[in-house]
Image (tube, helix red, strand yellow):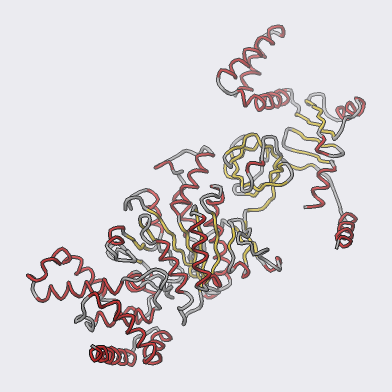
Amino acid sequence: MYAEALIGAVDKIPGSAQNMTLKRFLGVVRKNGDWSGLRKILVATRMMLARKAGGRVVNLEFARGVSDGTISKFSKAFSHKDHVEVEINPRLVAGMRITIDGEKELDNSLQRKLTKLFT
Amino acid sequence: MSYDLVEKLKREIEGFKDEPGFEKIGTVVEVGDGIAKISGLREALSQELLSIEAEGHHVPAVAFNLEENFIGVVILGESHAVKTGDRVRQTGRILSIKAGDELIGRVVDPLGEPLDGKGVIFSKPEKARDYFLERRAPSVIVRESVKTPLHTGVKSIDAMTPIGRGQRELIIGDRQTGKTSIVLDTILNQKQDVGRPPVVCIYVAIGQKNSKIAKIIKTLEEAGALEYTVIVSAPASAAASLQYLAPFAGCAIGEFFMDQGRDALVIYDDLSKHADAYRELSLLLRRPPGREAYPGDIFYLHSRLLERAAKMDKERGGGSLTALPIIETKLGDVSAYIPTNVISITDGQIYLESNLFYQGIRPAVNVGLSVSRVGSAAQTKAMKKVASRLRLELAQFRELQAFVQFASDLDENTRKKIKRGELLTEVLKQVDGNPVPFEKQVVILYATLQGFLDDLPKEAIKPFEAQFIDYLEKRHRDDVLALIQTTGELGEKAENSLRKAIEEFKNVMSLKK
């Protein structure tokens, strides 16, 4: 609900006043005692924005830092409407993992292979 | 040893095949109190087993609430290891337990993990079979009517509220009225109840104190009853999710034996605590509360569990699953929500009363309020013949009981009825942990109801009973006790021998005096 309200409010006002709206929004969340759920709100907002634009939220996780060139190469594999995020996750040990909309994943990490081998 | 392990690992690594592809996943967005909310996994099924990838290990969970955007799950393992952001995967499996003969004599948790420190349960896991915790109850077509008795060893129950194999008989009463003692006696009695196929017992402890469970295990072990008993333990210290699953696990184990064509008895001790655990889970999952804050499907929860008790027809092996659920009432209030629900589901109830217990009438069975709707069809002919008058005589005694203190002013007939009632009440008393085999119940009830004990004071009944049974064991084992035990009947021959034996014994007793 917060995500829906935030997107609705930001849509109606010009770009210059959007920062102010965002501050007010954070104030409302804090006042309502929902600050602990802020991460969830942001994830939902990101998802809704991507869907509104006709795309998906794509999360690229690498086990260690990779060059900008590699990142842009991967990003190009997705539509320009998709919201692509890059994260470094050492728990993967080696390799990478792609998650789409938090519901589908392609896991090519060594961590998964090791887990699969020993369970 | 280490060389073997390395070689084994090498072989596994060499043979490892990995075909990565897109997989459906969910994410934990909220967790607490053994419950988690998961986003994603839109295709998860209700009651499906999910696997949460917590740090270092996988934690099992069951999908409970399938909502528009989230799934409410009940965590079955270490819930403190689960945190928000953890990934969740479907397993495509419904919750099940491994069942097999090797479970007998063991203490397990509702997921089938051993709790008795005796090591792995199945030496050959391929021989164990997976049994779903939730399974549809057998249909009417595959059932047969209840016709074989399940003797409890408790005189007042076997004589007046008999239980048949495949029946569901509720044991209801306040705390400390001897509910667990009755079911323990029933388990102990199966060892001495020869002449019928043996019964595998499953005792399910739900929300009990660990000390009480340990005591029960010790009692059964010492009596040699653990040799045919499985204990499913979900103590008060276990998570509500495990307490909720425990009776279903016990039932699944019982169904395994039933499907083998054997007779099984499952005891749910107790369903009040089970209802409380389910209420806790439901409230945490934010399901709407109903009467006494229990969720709307609390009746269905217990009915679908108890409906699984059945006597199967010959084509399905002829096995049976008898259920003895226990309900604890508060201050004798049987009209509370859960007691009325379970009373209406079961085929009768054994009502234990605090007042009787404190008067020294133990087991404190209220014979007026206790009923068995199908058990009489399963009662042996011998017991039926003997006990047919018992209920009537006790009912007459109860009516006249108020006049006991004015007995000297009453007419002869009334005084006789009061005297007989007092004798019968005395005969029906027995200590816990000492179940009486059915043939011995038959002879002592016969002696009382035929008036052979009318000349004895009620204080002399217990010594008389013990000595008389001892006398029969020594002098009339074959012509009375064994005959009743094997045939299940009190035929003319056995009856004549019994009458003769009683007279003989009374003569011996009078000579001794």
Who's the residue at 88% across and 30% down the image? A65
**Horizontal side of residue B508 vs A61, given as left or right:** left
* Snapshot quadrant of residue B231: bottom right
- Could you tell me residue B441's position as x and y percent? 35, 78
- In the displayed structure, B315 sits above or below B205; it is below
Q: Toward the viewer: B147 or B339?
A: B339
Hey, which residue is sitting farthest front in the picture?
A: B513
- Percent from the top left, x then y, of residue B60? 66, 48
How many numbered marks appear?
A: 0
Q: Nearer the viewer, residue B162 or B435?
A: B435
Residue B254 x/y as whole percent: 54, 65
Task: Check the picture and name the quadrant holding the N terminus of chain B.
Answer: bottom right
Q: Is residue B224 left or right of residue B146?
A: right
Q: Nearer the viewer, residue A97 or B60?
A: B60
Quadrant containing the C terminus of chain B in the rendered view: bottom left
Compared across the picture, whether B393 is left or right of B235 comes to left
